[in-house]
Image: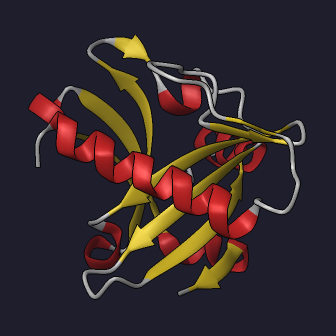
């Protein structure tokens, strides 16, 4: 998939996150355009929402930290949590609610498996973590 398709795919999961988990009268802020700080804010709690189509195969959670030589993802976010959807081809998903402070701690402790490149043109750099490290943060399997 190209950038536009990936963006649409991600935006669909942001909407699913809001509709399914935070739609009952909560104050919701979803900044438009290129906004590096967070994706969704619900009653003052900020979320970075990710949808990953590869994790069900690789068994890795990818946390971006740089793109095109500049800080991005975990480096620039002010989100309190990463709402991380692992999308399964049959339309199902697993949702992990990962505290951002924990991700940063695990990065500083080098608990990731390795660093990888990916995304459009392989411009993004990311830490890959074994999913098993986050099993207690699994909040939904739909």
Is residue 62 visible in the rendered image? The answer is no
Q: In this view, does 83 lie to the left or right of 91?
A: right
* Count of all numbered marks drawn on residues in the image: 0
Residue at x 55% of width, y 48% of height: 49
Q: Where is residue 81 in the image (x, y as percent from the top left)?
A: 72, 48
Q: Position of residue 35 (x, y in %)?
A: 53, 20
The quadrant where residue 100 appears: top right
State the residue in front, 107 or 84. 84
Q: Is residue 26 left or right of residue 7?
A: right
Task: Single out the residue that lies furthest toward the top.
Answer: 70
Residue at x 64% of width, y 62% of height: 19
Residue at x 26% of width, y 77% of height: 57
Q: Where is residue 10 in the image (x, y as percent from the top left)?
A: 39, 49
Residue at x 56% of width, y 32% of height: 74
Colour scheme of the rendered structure? secondary structure
* On screen, residue 4 above or below 15: above
State the residue in front, 14 or 83. 14
């Amino acid at each position: 998939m190209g950038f536009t398709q990936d963006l649409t795919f991600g935006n669909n999961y942001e909407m699913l996150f809001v509709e399914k988990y935070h739609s009952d009268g909560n104050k919701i802020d979803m900044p438009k355009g290129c906004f590096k700080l967070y994706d969704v804010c619900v009653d003052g709690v900020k979320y970075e929402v990710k949808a990953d189509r590869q994790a069900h195969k690789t068994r890795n959670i990818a946390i971006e930290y740089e793109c095109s030589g500049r800080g991005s993802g975990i480096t620039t976010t002010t989100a309190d949590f990463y709402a991380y959807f692992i999308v399964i081809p049959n339309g199902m998903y697993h949702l992990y609610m990962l505290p951002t402070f924990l991700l940063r701690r695990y990065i500083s402790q080098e608990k990731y498996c390795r660093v990888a490149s990916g995304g459009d043109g392989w411009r993004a750099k990311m830490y890959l973590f074994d999913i098993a490290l986050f099993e207690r943060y699994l909040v939904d399997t739909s």
